[in-house]
Amino acid sequence: MVSTLFRECLMDVYIAEHGGEAAFEVMLSHAENDEQRYILGTLLQAETEGKALMRPLISRLGLPLLDPGNTRAETAAATEPFKEVPWRERFVFLGEAVRTTYLPRYEELATLVSADEDAQAAKIAQFMGTHERALLALAVNVIDGVADPAAPVAAILHFPLARLA
């Protein structure tokens, strides 16, 4: 049986995935070339897969499958002004948000459950930390001008996007 703290943290992570998906949809709609579309599409795919991965556990625990607030709309509206921000600078903001806000919460999730308590929950909690660390690595790669900056995220996807030549 998982704790109330685990359930609360799981929902925070799940709702953050909703927000991330909305943010990356807005950013993708303003992509200027195939490389940007691939990077932002990969981020969008990661958020979509994160939600899909958590959904069976959330359902089993009797938690709401829908975003109980207005996270998607609020995040989309907050992201819209970033279309004016230069490409690399967007990833400075993204990296800072992941490093200071999201990654600590995602990593906390794994500390709140053990495989003995719930093997599925523990596996998902570990993966979500890996997921968020990959997003941070992508942001750093874009900032640093690394070739194939989306590789850390693409490597963890079950359904990676095709890269256009």
Image (tube, rainbow, N blue to C red):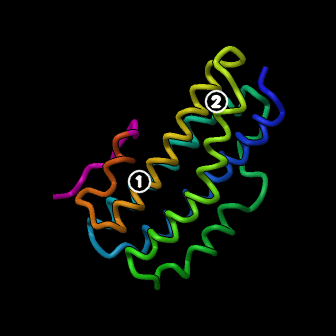
Q: Amino acid at mark 2?
A: Pro
Q: Give the extent of the magenta segment.
A: 156-165
* Residue at image coords 46%, 73%: 90
In the rendered view, tell whether residue 24 sits above or below residue 54: below
> CA separation, marks 2 and 1?
27 Å
Q: Is residue 96 left or right of residue 63?
A: left
* Residue at image coords 40%, 40%: 157
Q: Indicate the position of residue 45 as horizontal and vertical percent values.
A: 44, 49
Which of the 4 image quadrants contains residue 41? bottom left
Which one is in front, 132 or 66?
132
Q: Indicate the position of residue 57 as horizontal and vertical percent values.
A: 67, 29
Residue neighbourhood size for the residue with mark 1, other residues' Cα within 10 Å, grouped as few (<14), some (14–19), many (≥20): some
Q: Which residue is mark 2?
A: 56
Q: Quadrant of the N terminus?
A: top right
In the rendered view, tell whether residue 11 sits above or below residue 16: above
* Residue at image coords 35%, 65%: 142
Q: Where residue 137 is drawn, which disc sits there?
A: 1
Q: Indicate the position of residue 17 as horizontal and vertical percent values.
A: 60, 51
